[in-house]
Amino acid sequence: MTSPSEPRTPRLYHAFEPLAAGAIVAVSIATFYLVAAVVVPGNGFIIAQVLLAAIPVIAATSRRQGLGVLGIAPARGVYVVAAVLVGVSMWYLNWRVVNWIEPPGDTKALDDATRRTSLGAALVMLAIVPPICEEILFRGVLARSLASRLSVTAAASITAVVFSAYHLSLVQAMPTFALGLVLSLLAIRADSIVPAVITHALNNAIAVIIARDDIPAVDAWFDAHPTGALCACTAASGAGIALAIVGPRGLVERGFAR
């Protein structure tokens, strides 16, 4: 590791090399599904999620690269605002699209995890653990690595495809791709996965609460004002994405990871 007096080389501190990133993603996803299939259901999912993030963290620390290589770093305020705007609104846009297209698929397992547990357990399982663990892998490792070699659009698109495929669900394919695209944009532009974690957590938390009908007044408002809700959520998501696009570029996007 370099001494404090030595310059910090971009390769050491800002992103994994693409081949290393691909290997980490492949091993992490394989481990996730192996553990989720072998360990008792319920606890197995949480353990598998933790391993999804643990493998990249171990890879970073074992090579003395530090957690900064995973994008675990503070983010500028503009990206936090962008993350909140997208997080509170994009769930509704994806819900409307899925209802319109009606893709094939079974959401029984997801529905069970959402409705047949306490609100606290559902939020931990779907809105706290996955946003942290999945963002470390997909945006911290893959998106940042690709962005050091490709354009933001290409890096975000490839990462979104992998993120969508990881869920192994046709009915979730389009919303996870769309969400993954925006999460990747946020992480790359901010040079931090913190905004992506915020968006992911808000998106999942609101979706869980709405699906459980824990706040009937909110559900009733969305049902009574579909056009207004669509316009408001479109505006919020659009504003968040625009902020992410016009915000200052991070080191990875500027090619410092090469």
Image (cartoon, rainbow, N blue to C red):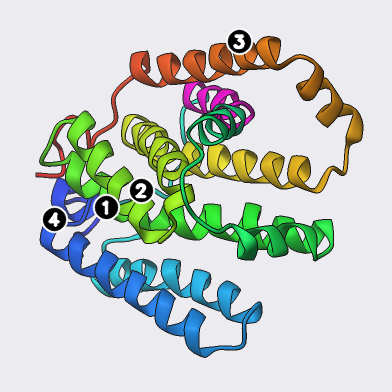
* Residue 89 counted in the magenta span: yes
Total marks in image? 4
Residue 52, above or below 239 = below
Marks 3 and 2: in contact by CB < 8 Å?
no
Marks 4 and 2: in contact by CB < 8 Å?
no
In the drawing, does residue 87 fall left or right of residue 210?
Answer: left
In the rendered structure, which amino acid carries the disc numbered 2? Arg
| Mark 1 surroundings: few (<14), some (14-19) or many (≥20) residues within 10 A | many
Residue in front for this viewpoint, 235 or 183: 235
Residue at 47%, 33% in the rendered image: 101
- What's the mark number on residue 139? 2
- What's the mark number on residue 142? 1
In the rendered structure, which amino acid carries the disc numbered 1? Leu
Q: Main secondary structure of the magenta part?
A: helix
Say which label, 3 or 1, has the lower sequence index. 1
Helix, strand or loop at label 3? It is: helix
In the drawing, does residue 195 fall left or right of residue 18?
Answer: right
Marks 1 and 2: in contact by CB < 8 Å?
yes
Residue at 33%, 60% in the rendered image: 66
- Work out how far the residue at label 2 is from the one at label 1, CA to CA, in angstroms: 6 Å
- One can see residue 7 in this view: no
- What's the mark number on residue 18? 4
